[in-house]
Amino acid sequence: MRALVLAAGRGERLQPLTDLRPKSMLPLVGRPILHYIVDDIRLAGVTDMVFVVGYRKEMIQNYFKDGNAFGATITYVEQRKPLGEADAILKAESELAGEDAFILAHGDYVSEAGLVKRVVDAFCESGSDIAIALSRVENPSEYGVAALGENSRIERVVEKPSASAKLGNLAVSSVYAFTPAIFHVLRRIGHLEQGISHMIERGAKAAGIVWDREWMDIGRPWEVLRASRFLLSKVFSKTPRYISPSARLPPEARLEEPYHISDNVEIDHGAVVRGGCYLDSGCRIGTNALIRDYSYVGKNVIAGYSTEVKNSVILHDTSLGHIAYVGDSVIGSHCEIGAGVITSNFRFDEKPIEVNVGRKRYNSGLQKLGAMIGDHVKIGVNSSIYPGCKIGSNTWIGPSIVVTFDIPQNRFLSVDQKVKIRRQRSKVRPDLEL
């Protein structure tokens, strides 16, 4: 059995974090999302994989190459135009010729290990034509939803059903197993969920595998924070305290477990690291800085004097100036955040924070959410960013600017300052003379 992995998507809903990378290559705790998926496929005993790539395909190919370093054999098929998942699957039909069955996995989810193995085992044991992983979700209207009948057989699959459909809350969870019959159906139907329902209506046996462990679709920027926290919790459940021998810490360093201090990390006097934080290799934490509450600080990141980072993801080679505050935020790579910059993460009216995703405005459901900042962004000293704002990659924001709305990529923001100078009429009082 081989695995087909769909990794061609640009991830427009994840912008600005995907301005310069495909969504499957978004780093979480130092590794791309796709790396975790490859590991889980291997855990199922499947090592022969086909990647469908498209947007910025070279990033995926340069990272995984032929798969040998990851214990796999990887070949690539290109989807030149973003024509959907059915088209992406059909692009790999000739590559999968001769297979009795194959695994299909999307390249943009995070789950507990073992999800793919559960699907493979259920598919083989049940003798089904289709097997689909299902997870319980709070808002089924945002997913493909499966209706289960007796003996966990799927009766139909509906893409983003309305509340009135009353299909339940079992969402299709990014992992499937198929026989080659799916290719013929997709050529006729042109849509995966509709194609599955078409096969079921004509007698195909479809097994639903309810996955009650953690699974999350990484489809919107703030979901990166939840995924990062989950992955960090998995790291700390195995090793709650780790300090690399090459890390440089003062004797009085204040570290509160769980924590992970990687190679060549440097922590200055008075700095505090607490509450489940991961400092990746080469980063420097300045004097009196505070890193807390499940923050991931990427490779070669610099956090300046008295800077605070709380429940955030900061990607590699970014610098945070003195006395900055980064709360509940995601900051891309190669950014320069000036001294005194504040990412506001809480509304005065205490309502959940809303975020623009594509052309829609979503309620994140979060009381605290800061900024989502792309790569190669520069923000001048003493600027502030309102909760839920997004700043596109390659954007520069001048000093002392209050950002209250989303900024697209490749912009430059400045303010015109009008200064008035008048002669001081009052004289210096004698008792103030030197």
Image (cartoon, rainbow, N blue to C red):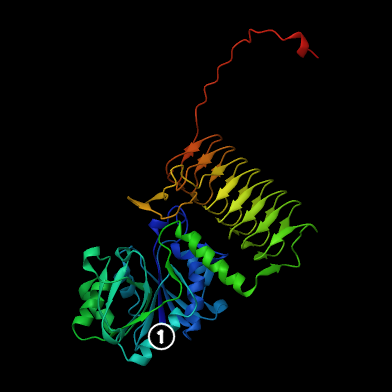
Name of the residue lying farthest toward the left? 202
Where 46 falls versus 391 (above or below)?
A: below
Side (left or right) of 422 relative to 185: right
Q: Residue at x 56, y 68 (%)?
A: 233
In front of the other: 349 or 382: 349
Q: Which corner quadrant of the image does residue 251 belong to?
A: bottom right
- In percent of width and height, residue 171 lies at 34, 71
Q: Residue at x 57, y 49 (%)?
A: 326
Q: Residue at x 46, y 44 (%)?
A: 347
Q: Which residue is mark 1?
A: 120
Circle 1 crowding by C-alpha within 10 Å: few under 14, some 14–19, many from 20: many
Q: Report helix, strand or loop for mark 1.
A: helix
Instruction: Point out the image quarter for the C terminus.
Output: top right
- In percent of width and height, residue 177 lies at 35, 82
Name of the residue lying farthest toward the front? 349
- In percent of width and height, residue 333 lies at 56, 54
Instruction: Point out the image quarter for the N terminus.
Output: bottom left
In front of the other: 34 or 270: 270
- In percent of width and height, residue 112 lies at 49, 75
Q: Which corner quadrant of the image does residue 89 belong to?
A: bottom left
* Amino acid type, callout 1: Val
Q: Residue at x 31, y 88 (%)?
A: 128
Where 232 falls versus 321 (above or below)?
A: below
Where 294 falls versus 306 (above or below)?
A: below
Residue 162 visible, this angle: no
